[in-house]
Amino acid sequence: MVDEEGFREFVRARLPRLSRAAYLLAGGHAQAEDLLQGALIKAALHWAKVSAAGDPEAYIRKILYHEHVRTWRRRRFLEHSTADVPDRAAAGDETDRAVLRLVLEQALAKLTPRQRAVIVLRYFEDLSEVVTAQVMGTSVGTVKSQTSHALSRLRTLAPELAGEIETEMGVRS
């Protein structure tokens, strides 16, 4: 790696955003750290080429997605969340948001890895359908159909998120 300081600067600037994407893909902190660390190692090994290509963040997001897919293909099974949402919440806006985050996390964990990835890339990373298709290595039509199936499944799995899906993600029912 020729430009080690450039890589360090990039990571310092983009780490929160990349960490969030890794967490949303992996569904847990430890898995997200492993996923992101692997992606950053791969990017560091080819940093001169990656940084010269123009958009290193997009390149690393693509590595994240491909590493995520490789992980679940190796396992040959889907993860299922077993934690229960608390029966009652304390008063306050922060508590309500925390419960919504838990419900969303559990619902995302029940989607297929491809559906979870398309939701993360489209709505949490705010990528266009075209860019999402490029990152996932699929067609725009596949992104559209996977998005539709994933949103429908989210509405079924967590009806309490329907309002959040509409307002936060900008999606109509």
Image: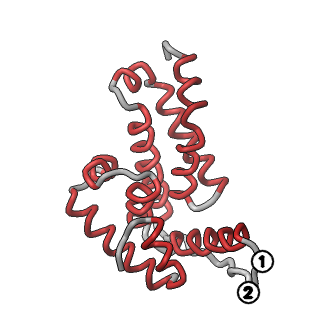
Q: Residue at x 44, y 81 (%)?
A: 155
Q: Is residue 34 above or below residue 13?
A: below
Q: How many marks?
A: 2
Q: Residue at x 50, y 14 (%)?
A: 3
Q: Are marks 2 and 1 in contact (CB under 8 Å)?
A: no
- Give percent across and percent down for residue 115: 39, 67
- Give percent across and percent down for residue 110: 50, 75
- Give percent across and percent down for residue 1: 50, 17
Q: Residue at x 24, y 63 (%)?
A: 142
User: Residue 88 vs residue 48: left or right?
Assistant: right
Work out how far the residue at label 2 is from the one at label 1, CA to CA, in angstroms: 13 Å
User: Residue 108 vs residue 152: left or right?
Assistant: right
Q: Quadrant of the C terminus?
A: bottom left
Q: Amino acid at mark 2?
A: Asp
Label 1: how many residues lie within 10 Å, few (<14), some (14-19) or many (20+)? Answer: few
- Give percent across and percent down for residue 36: 56, 43
Residue on which disc 1 sits: 91
Q: Residue at x 31, y 68 (%)?
A: 146
Mark drawn on residue 153: none
Foreground: disc 2 or disc 1: 1
Q: Amino acid at mark 1?
A: Ala
Q: Is residue 173 above or below residue 93?
A: below
User: Residue 88 vs residue 148: left or right?
Assistant: right
Instruction: Name the outermost residue toward the right.
Output: 90
Residue 46, by quadrant, is top left
Question: Helix, strand or loop at disc 2?
Answer: loop
Q: Is residue 118 above or below residue 6?
A: below
Mark drawn on residue 87: 2
Label 2: how many residues lie within 10 Å, few (<14), some (14-19) or many (20+)? Answer: few
